[in-house]
């Protein structure tokens, strides 16, 4: 047979070359990174090809399953869950898994992702159904941990490692959400009232403690003032007693000026007390009082006659002239010397 001028030898060579190319194509396989290929010989699994260049026995061995060994994410669809206290909620999740044994993942389970998805959904209903609604909403980490442990244990024979299971959303019914909102509002109002009462109580306690300390300090101040006042009166009495003793000694020694000093001092103190009285612009002095002022000198003279002036013997006392008739009460307006704003009327 003549094909386009080619001889029989040429056709054989071409056939051999094509056969060699076909054999090489069938015997050399390249596995990308992140994948594993299973090899089957006459339909039986023999080995797993690693990433890189691999050689198979042409026409005897073939690639069985191309398995992705990178970590993959699988969406778990939303499903209804009945909690332990008969509350109906909707929940969905995501699961992360990785193929550790390609041969087991390829030949131990059919439709691997569908199997993991259904297994996770079943365990979500089981785990969440064993919890109350409040526990369900407040312990999401506990749910994730329990789901991961249960699902990972179940997929172990398939050569799969579930690395994470996360509950994405838990949606209670609308009426239940409204009730939870009212409960949360009431709880916050309760806490606010408690905090306000505690603040008022603390404020009252602080004010009472402040008043107590102020009263104690005031009492201590009064006691200290009374003590000092008593001490001052005691010192004043001692001074007056000493002055009286000195005057008495001076009078006994014949110093008539001491009598004048003593009488004048007491009289001036009495006038000062009268002048310091409130609403006292005018001081009405008895006529006898002015006479007493004028007779101070006379008192001194009498004392000099009684005790002498110290240079000679004392003169005998003059006989008394007897009681003198007392005039009627007369008063003389005098300008108050201790109140400069007073005026004579």
Image (cartoon, grey):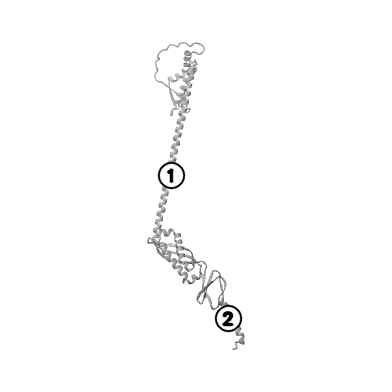
- Disc 2: which residue: 19
Looking at the image, which is closer to me, 271 or 54? Answer: 54
Q: Distance between the residues labelled 1 and 2?
A: 101 Å
Rendered position, 189 above or below 119: above
Mark in the foreground, 1 or 2: 2
State the residue at coordinates (43%, 62%).
170
Looking at the image, which is closer to me, 124 or 317? Answer: 124
Rendered position, 281 above or below 4: above
Q: Residue 338 location in percent, x, y?
A: 47, 26
Horizontal side of residue 272 vs 23, given as left or right = left
Rendered position, 228 above or below 305: below
Q: Residues within 10 Å of mark 2 (few under 14, many from 20)?
A: few
- Disc 1: which residue: 203
State the residue at coordinates (60%, 84%).
12
Ranked by sequence position, the earlier of labels 1 and 2 is: 2
Looking at the rendered structure, the secondary structure element under dot 2 is helix
Q: Which quadrant would the N terminus be assigned to in this image?
A: bottom right
Mark number displayed over residue 87: none
Q: Which quadrant would the C terminus be assigned to in this image?
A: top left
Extreme residue in the left direction: 86
Q: Residue 47 location in percent, x, y?
A: 53, 72
């Amino acid at each position: 047979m003549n094909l386009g001028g080619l001889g029989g030898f040429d056709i054989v060579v071409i056939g051999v070359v094509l056969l060699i190319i076909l054999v090489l194509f069938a015997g050399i396989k390249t596995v990308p990174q992140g994948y594993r290929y299973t090899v089957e010989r006459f339909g039986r699994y023999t080995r797993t090809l690693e990433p890189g260049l691999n050689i198979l026995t042409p026409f005897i061995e073939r690639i069985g399953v191309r398995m992705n060994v990178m970590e993959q994410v699988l969406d778990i669809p939303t499903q209804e869950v009945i909690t332990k206290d008969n509350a109906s909620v909707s929940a969905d999740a995501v699961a992360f898994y990785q193929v550790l044994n390609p041969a087991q993942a390829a030949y131990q389970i059919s439709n691997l992702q569908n199997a993991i998805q259904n297994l996770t959904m079943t365990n979500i209903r089981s785990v969440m159904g064993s919890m109350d609604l409040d526990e369900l909403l407040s312990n999401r980490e506990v749910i994730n941990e329990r789901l991961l442990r249960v699902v990972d244990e179940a997929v172990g024979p398939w050569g799969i490692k579930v690395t994470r299971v996360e509950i994405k959303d838990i949606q209670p019914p609308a009426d239940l959400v409204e009730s939870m909102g009212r409960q949360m509002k009431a709880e916050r109002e309760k806490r606010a009232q408690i905090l306000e009462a505690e603040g008022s109580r603390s404020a009252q306690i602080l004010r009472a403690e402040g008043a107590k300390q102020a009263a104690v300090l005031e009492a201590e101040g009064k006691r200290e003032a009374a003590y000092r006042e008593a001490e001052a009166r005691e010192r004043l009495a001692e001074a007056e007693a000493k002055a009286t003793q000195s005057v008495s000694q001076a009078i006994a020694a014949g110093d008539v000026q001491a009598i004048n000093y003593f009488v004048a001092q007491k009289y001036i103190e009495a006038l000062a007390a009268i002048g310091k009285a409130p609403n006292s612009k005018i001081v009405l002095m008895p006529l006898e009082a002015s006479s007493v002022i004028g007779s101070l000198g006379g008192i001194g003279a009498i004392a000099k006659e009684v005790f002498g002036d110290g240079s000679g013997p004392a003169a005998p006392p003059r006989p008394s002239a007897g009681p003198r008739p007392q005039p009627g009460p007369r008063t003389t307006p005098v300008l108050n010397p201790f109140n400069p704003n007073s005026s004579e009327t």
